[in-house]
Image (cartoon, grey):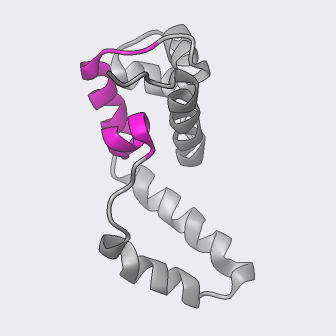
């Protein structure tokens, strides 16, 4: 049996939430839990049901595998994006990140 590291899981969730610019209130509303429960998940004080995990992954636009295990999909799938971002001067790459955030948020 695998022991889940709820603190690390919560850190991944918080990192993605803040990356997308979402508040805990917004996430709680979207996944139908209390804001306090969201906080407890993010600090690793509580776990969550599979259905909450799936809703959370959907709202945060990340995979359940990433949330639970930190695993990402194959880099080959995203290599065209990586090549494009790498071609941007380093001092301008933050603009590409901000554009991606706006794009991802517009999908709601």
Residue situated furthest right in the rendering:
91
Tell me the quarter of the image containing the N terminus.
top left
Where residue 77 sits in the image (x, y, percent)? 30, 72
Where residue 78 sits in the image (x, y, percent)? 36, 72
The quadrant holding residue 14 is top right
Q: Seen in the image, is 87 located left or right of residue 91?
A: left
Q: From what the image shows, is residue 83 above or below residue 71? A: below
Front position in the image: 16 or 108? 16
Q: Seen in the image, is 90 located left or right of residue 73?
A: right
Residue shown at 58% from the left, 47% from the top:
19
Q: Seen in the image, is 17 located left or right of residue 52?
A: right
Residue situated furthest left in the rendering:
51
Where residue 60 sits in the image (x, y, percent)? 41, 40
The quadrant holding residue 40 is top right
Residue shown at 43% from the left, 21% from the top:
3
Q: From what the image shows, is residue 79 above or below residue 43? A: below
Q: How many marks?
A: 0
The quadrant holding residue 27 is top left
Residue shown at 56% from the left, 90% from the top:
87
Residue situated furthest front in the rendering:
1
Tell me the quarter of the image containing the C terminus.
top left
Front position in the image: 101 or 66? 66
Q: Is residue 89 magenta?
A: no
Q: From what the image shows, is residue 59 above or below residue 72? A: above
Magenta segment's dominant SS is helix
Residue shown at 34% from the left, 37% from the top:
57
Range covered by the magenta-colored residues: 47-70
């Amino acid at each position: 049996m695998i022991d889940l590291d709820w603190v690390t899981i919560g850190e991944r969730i918080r990192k993605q939430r803040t990356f997308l610019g979402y508040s805990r209130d917004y996430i709680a509303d979207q996944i139908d839990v209390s804001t306090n429960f969201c906080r407890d998940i993010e600090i690793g004080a509580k776990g969550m049901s599979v259905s909450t995990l799936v809703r959370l992954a959907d709202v945060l636009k990340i995979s359940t595998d990433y949330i639970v295990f930190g695993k990402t999909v194959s880099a080959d799938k995203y290599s065209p994006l990586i090549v494009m971002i790498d071609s941007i001067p380093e001092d301008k790459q933050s603009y590409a990140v901000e554009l991606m955030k706006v794009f991802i948020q517009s999908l709601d």
